[in-house]
Image: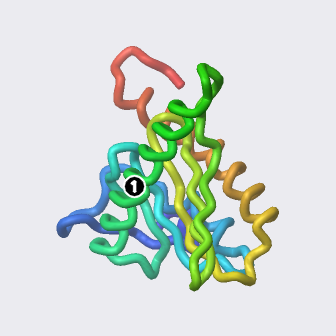
Amino acid sequence: MDSHSAAAGRVQTKGRPLALDVSWVLSPLLALPGVARGVVLSRDGLILGGSADVNAETGERAAAMTSSVLGAARALCEGLSDGGDGEVVDIVISAGSGYYYIAPAGDRAAIVVAATHAVNMGALAYEVQLQVQKLIKALDEASAARTPGTRA
């Protein structure tokens, strides 16, 4: 594991490691009291990382469902914004077991974390937004590194 992934694990999909594993972005979130697990996903629902207790099947299912929820939320915001900014900043789902906090990271990725009712939602929202900015930067750098002639 790299230095970023102390609280997050290496996720494998279909028997192979991810090409770009950004599980490290979850570490500060998993350190918050009440946060149980998390997944980082691409906009199209592919898993980019996950907490150590998220296996490949669970992570892939969560990534796909989260992508669908974000797509529906974007469509709802655009449809009801009367031409205003319909950007989704975050989504909180309250369930019997706790909360699911979803935050898009630009137009390419998102973070979803599961938390118990004991979580401080204000602290979680703040920390997630900090990690979203780090994730966007990491994805930009990775994209620039793959594009010949482009520098970060």
Query: Residue at coordinates 50% horizontally, 50% vertically from top-left?
Result: 110
Dot 1 amino acid type: Leu
Examine the image and state in which quarter residue 32 appears: bottom right
Report x, y in % for residue 13.
25, 65
Query: Residue at coordinates 33% horizontally, 44% vertically from top-left?
Result: 44
Give the secondary structure at mark 1. Answer: strand
Position of residue 14 in the picture relative to residue 39 (left or right): left
Query: Residue at coordinates 55% horizontally, 61% vertically from top-left?
Result: 24
- Look at the picture and state if 144 lies above or below 113: above
Report x, y in % for residue 123.
80, 64
Front residue of 103 and 73: 73
Instruction: Name, please, the residue furthest toward the left.
Output: 14
Front residue of 150 and 99: 99
Report x, y in % for residue 134.
63, 45
Residue beneath disc 1: 48
Position of residue 128 in the picture relative to residue 122 (left or right): left
Specify few, some or many for label 1: CA neighbours under 10 Å numbering under 14, 14-19, or 20 or more. Answer: many
The coloring applied to the image is rainbow
Is any part of residue 141 visible from this angle?
A: no
Position of residue 104 in the picture relative to residue 60 (left or right): right
Query: Residue at coordinates 70% horizontally, 82% vertically from top-left?
Result: 117
Examine the image and state in which quarter residue 128 appears: bottom right
Report x, y in % for residue 82.
61, 24
Instruction: Name, please, the residue furthest toward the top.
Output: 149
